Amino acid sequence: MQNPFLTPTVLIPWSRLTSDRVLEAVQEGVRLGEKALAEIAALPPEARGVESVLMAFERATEPLDFAWNLINHLDGVDNSPALRDAIREALPLVSGFYARVRLDARLWEALRWVSESPEGQALTGVRRRFMDETLADFRESGADLPDEGKRRLEALEGELASITQTFSENVLDAMNQYELLIDDPARLDGLPESARAAALALARAKGLGTPTQPVWRFTLHMPSYLPVMKFSADEPLRRTLWEAMGAVGGVAPHDNTPLIGQILRLRHEKATLLGAAHFPDHILNRRMARRGEVALGFINRLHERVKGAFDADVAELAAFKAELLNQPGVALEPWDVTYYSERLRQARYELDEEALRPYFPLDGVLNGLFALVERLFGLTVTPRETCCPRAGGPQVPGAIETWHPEVRYFELHDQGGRLLGAFYTDWHPRESKQGGAWMASLYTAEAASPGQRGPHVGLIAGNLTAPTDGGPALLTHREVETVAHELGHLLHHLTSDVEVRSFSGANVAWDFVELPSQIMENWCWQRASLDLIARHHETGEPLPQPLFDRLVAAHNFQAGINFMAQLAHGKLDLELHLGGRDWAPEELDLRLRELLDGWRVPTQTDAGFIVRRFTHLFAHPTGYAAAYYSYKWAEVLDADAFTRFRDEGVLSPVVGREYLERVLSRGNSAPPEQLFRDFMGRDPDPDALLRRCGLSV
């Protein structure tokens, strides 16, 4: 029987994707890939052509690509000891195979031969771009290295895959092992009812507490952690949770400190082996920034522009705490910043975040966003019935299988009724699931020509507020933005209409990939679109105008602090990859403290650093390494691009269709700079983001 991991399909049989089939799938996928690539490499010159070499190369690894994608997906949403063991065993096979592909001298020779042939020289459009990018991939992956260099590069790839997998597992395990139990209701002072109910539900799920002696359980997952940091009047409680979060990835047996230096050194060695000065130059060579110094310069210039606003925000926050406590000169602590910021926001704008929740039931938010997608892009979203035999449920004829009972499934159609794609949603925390929010492309259909392709399949997932006491999940406004953000990534994938599969959707330069996601967040702040998204879960009433006005008025509250926090992450990332490889583990914090002086809110107790749990940088051989700046880079693009909607109509289907046709659906078929110009008619305005944030330009 065919291994279920190896059959690319729209209807994925999750109940058959078991841990005991992982190694077999990888072994067979590698065998199939090696066979297909060997056949291409063995072609005599007279049989070489664009179809037989270039496009055959594009398809050669599809079974393994599909299988490994599903395996990594399950690792993120249904993690288990058995799956971890299987991945550990399969990982060297996968990383070794992919490293060898672009080191194959005969394959490299065949591709170059085709590129120099009359047929190759005559290529235009996306196939021309695919040829050029494939040749660049091979060069940057070591195709021209001597044999000794190729062997070392393959070993480096294997080490990076193994160590970054360990980093990821350490973060997940450290997060999951922590819990804080509270049995004194007085310690819940300040917490909104939604947070108390969630903590009570978390305790009951573990069999803790009784109706007469309740227990409240808090974890480090954001829906549990963040309300404490924002609302708890109990300073020791805030401090306890803050210290626990700070310890993630920094305490044995889950200490990532030594792994950071190892990963940085391996990446640097890889980059220099391939001819780059350092890892940022290697990884950014074909992205919009091009070089590490350009990315760092971008971050540093923004720092200079917002430093005044940042300092003013910090001074205001410190003064507010001192006034509130009647303690002149009292210093801020790290566990104070979020709490007093929220108190100040409430005092200034009379905006109670909890008053917004009833207007953001998860299902209503999704339906509103789907209605927005229909208005803007002419696309309709329809739900399908689901079942979950993987978790012991019955197999239901006609229903779509999922990996967890909470997961839902939808289809996306265009105006003509054509099925563009389908997607799963998985929104709430659980111990077998990684943190954060993300989109994953589970299946990418091949297109014979533009407009002639099958449906793509994707996933949007997060760790949002869960429902309690049988009621709906009521989201914060920031969580609504998160849903919109991931929906933007999803639309980039599902609407992609590109002939070359590996150029579809989000397979673009990483400093462009966040444009489709971040632009969607803008509609969470507009009256016309919020009337679609925000409806009271009991009455169906829209968001009251006074509440909307206060929400918008507070949009740029403490923009300097918030802006600087993202800049600091980007700075940390680039500085680590430019020079951090030479630091001893014990001097990591000291060096970062020196580099980020003036980039962080000054506090009495040092706030520490996210670095040991920074999965964006260290949970993948590449990931967002040397590229975290791209969030701010893409924010410049999205702030500028949204001005067309602002000026021509927030719900304009004309602008929406142009954006769909000129950006969303085009994937990597053209350079990102060209796609932006195709939509805006000009290059990006670098001041657009500062204007949107209300910061001086």
Image (cartoon, rainbow, N blue to C red):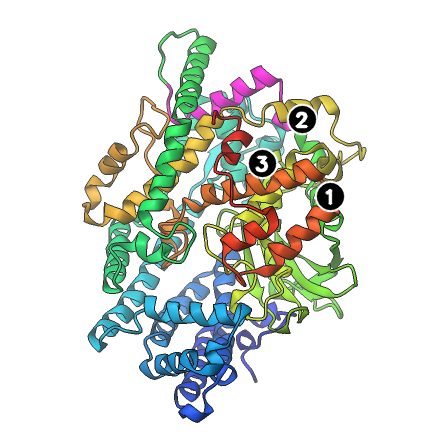
Q: CA distance from mark 3 to mark 2?
A: 13 Å
Question: For the residues carrying marks 3 and 2, which lies nearer the camera in this image?
Answer: 3
Spot occupied by residue 680 in the image (x, y as percentages of width and height): 59, 46
Q: Is residue 395 left or right of residue 202?
A: right
Relative to 696, is 103 above or below? below
Is any atom of residue 429 visible in this view?
no
Q: Earlier in the sequence, mark 3 or mark 2?
A: 2
Q: Nearer the viewer, residue 657 or 70?
A: 657
Q: Is residue 3 magenta?
A: no
Q: Is residue 359 left or right of residue 282?
A: right
Q: Nearer the viewer, residue 141 or 118?
A: 118
Asked whether disc 1 touches disc 2, contact meaning CB atoms under 8 Å apart, the reply is no
Is any atom of residue 215 visible in this view?
yes
- Residue behind mark 1: 652
Q: CA distance from mark 1 to mark 2?
A: 30 Å
- Residue behind mark 3: 478
Q: Which region is colored magenta?
A: 332-355
Q: Residue at x 50, y 52 (%)?
A: 673
